[in-house]
Image: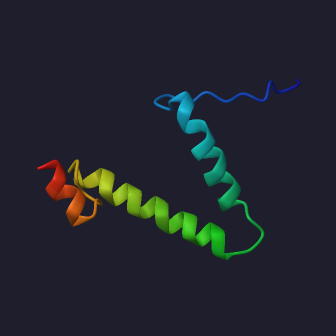
Amino acid sequence: MKSSGQCYMIGLQPQELDWVRLLIKLLRHHDPLPPELARQALRYVEQIADSGEATAGMPPAVRQQQA
C-alpha cells in the first residue's frame, strides 16, 4: 500500500506546518547540537503553555505594553 504523504493532526493549523517541518528537521539533524536545542525549546514552550498565563515567556517590556 502506497502512502499519500499526508498526515493529519487535530489542532494543527495549516500555517503551522512549516514550523512543524522545521522542528522535525532539527530533531533529525546529524549534528547532536541542533536536536538538543530543539528539545530544550520544546520543553520551554511546554512550560509556558502549562503556566496558563498569556504573557508568560514575554520580555518584561512587552508585558508592560500589553497591560
Give the colour scheme shown: rainbow
42 versus 49 height, above or below: below
Image location (x, y in percent) of residue 12: 50, 32
Locate residue 53 relative to residue 3 in the image: left or right. left
Which residue lies at the image location 59% right of the left edge and 45% below the top edge? Answer: 20
Which residue lies at the image location 14% right of the left edge and 57% below the top edge? Answer: 64
Question: Please, which residue is most extreme toward the left here?
Answer: 67
Tag count: 0
Locate residue 64 relative to residue 27 in the image: left or right. left
Which residue lies at the image location 49% right of the left edge and 68% below the top edge? Answer: 40
Query: Quadrant of the rendered structure where residue 27 is?
Result: bottom right
Image location (x, y in percent) of residue 50: 28, 53
**Closer to the camera in the image, 66 or 1:** 66
Q: Quadrant of the N terminus?
A: top right
3 versus 38 height, above or below: above
Image location (x, y in percent) of residue 29: 73, 64
Query: Quadrant of the rendered structure where residue 34 is?
Result: bottom right
Which residue lies at the image location 60% right of the left edge and 37% below the top edge? Answer: 17
Image location (x, y in percent) of residue 46: 38, 56
Locate residue 60 relative to residue 12 in the image: left or right. left
7 versus 50 height, above or below: above
